[in-house]
Image (cartoon, rainbow, N blue to C red):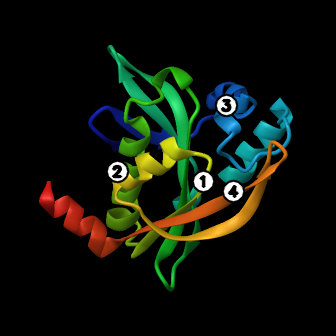
Amino acid sequence: MIYGKRIRLRGMERSDIPKSFEWINDPEVNDGLAIHLPMSLRDEEQWYEQMGQRDQAEKPMAIEMCEGEGWKLIGNCGVFNVEWVPRCAEVGIMIGDKTVWNRGYGTETMQLLLQHGFETLNLNRVYLRVYSTNPRAIRSYEKAGFILEGTLREAVYKHGKYADVHLMSVLRSEWQSIKDKK
């Protein structure tokens, strides 16, 4: 497990599927995700099985927050599209529990993913894609140290409109500089 101040990241379990299914079908939650149609429980189970076949570095992780004496599932995240020669990978996150939105859990999750990417996987660059229509996520990523690299113009179509997709990244040297300042 990967521990932060208020959260931990752990491997996804089959018992997480019902909660993920609920979140992935919530229009507010999936608005920032590359999902265009409702997902069935079977779809979510198949996704879980496919993720289980991935390389260890690319398996999704559950995000849990400390709650009293235990832990509460609030979302999931992961590293994917790992390229070992240039030492880069993409990251993604979903905070599905809307009751904890705007409390910094997304930023803390991204900080842990960066730490994992640079210190465990020995990456040099970590990047993500975010819709321009998701200012809360953009702000969270900036707080974690991500910098805008470029914009894919009108690259996504949701709710009858095209929107831009921003490409953001953090280099190991930038992350180390932020870490050294703390």
Q: Residue at x 29, y 70 (%)?
A: 174
Most distant residue in the bottom direction: 85
Label at residue 132: 1
Quadrant containing the N terminus in the rendered view: top left
Mark 2 → mark 1, Cα distance in angstroms? 16 Å
Which dot, 2 or 1, sits closer to the camera? 1
Label 3 vs 1, first from the N-terminus: 3
Q: Residue at x 34, y 50 (%)?
A: 143
Please tell me whether mark 3 sits on a helix, a strand or a loop: helix
Mark 3 → mark 4, Cα distance in angstroms? 29 Å
To which residue does mark 3 refer? 28
Residue 43 drawn at (x, y percent) = 83, 40
Locate residue 82: give its quadrant: bottom right
Residue type highlighted by circle 3: Glu
Residue type highlighted by circle 4: Gln
Residue 1 visible? The answer is no
